[in-house]
């Protein structure tokens, strides 16, 4: 867990405000938009095309 980048333990992010803002933006976009959309699409595929997942599970 010590290898994760956070605002508290990164001297570079503390000193560079522009980099800090970019890091927060990318983190927000990734965790609040991209991953939930991927999960939503996966669930829609499970509903619309269950045959695909049945074939994958048999192999």
Image: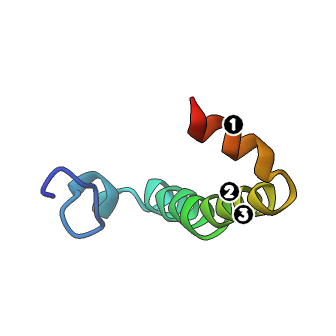
Q: Say which label, 2 or 3, has the lower sequence index.
A: 2
- Extreme residue in the top direction: 59
Q: Is mark 3 on a helix, strand or loop?
A: helix
Q: Name the residue under label 1.
A: 55
Residue sitting farthest toward the left = 2
Identify the residue at horizontal 28%, vertical 55% (top origin).
5
**Badge nearest the viewer, 1 or 2:** 1
Q: Is residue 15 above or below residue 53?
A: below
Say which element carries label 1: helix
Q: Residue 43 carries which label?
A: 3
* Disc on the earlier residue, 1 or 2: 2
Alpha carbons under labels 1 and 2: distance apart: 21 Å
**Image quarter of the C terminus:** top right
Mark with earlier residue (3, 1):
3
Which picture quadrant has residue 30? Answer: bottom right
**Which residue is found at the position 22% from the left and 70% from the top?**
8
Residue 37 position in % (x across, y down): 71, 62
* The one of 50 and 14 positioned closer to us in this rendering: 50
Residue in the image at 70% along x and 56% along y: 42
10 Å neighbourhood of mark 3: few (<14), some, or many (≥20)? Answer: few
| Residue at x-position 12% and y-position 56% | 2
Q: Do the residues labelled 2 and 3 touch (CB within 8 Å)?
A: no
Q: Nearer the viewer, residue 28 or 34?
A: 34
Determine whether label 3 and label 1 are within 8 Å by CB: no
Q: Nearer the viewer, mark 3 or mark 1?
A: 1
Question: Left or right of 43: which side holds 25?
Answer: left
Q: Which residue bears the numbered disc 2?
A: 38
| Distance Cα–Cα, label 3 vs label 1 | 17 Å
Q: Where is residue 29 in the image (x, y as percent from the top left)?
A: 62, 62
Disc nearest the viewer among 2 and 3: 3
Q: In which quarter of the image is the N terminus?
A: bottom left
């Amino acid at each position: 867990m010590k290898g994760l980048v956070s605002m508290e333990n990164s001297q570079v992010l503390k000193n560079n405000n522009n980099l800090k803002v970019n890091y927060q933006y990318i983190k927000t976009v990734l965790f609040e938009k991209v991953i939930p959309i991927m999960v939503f699409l996966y669930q829609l595929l499970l509903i619309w095309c269950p045959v695909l997942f049945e074939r994958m599970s048999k192999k």
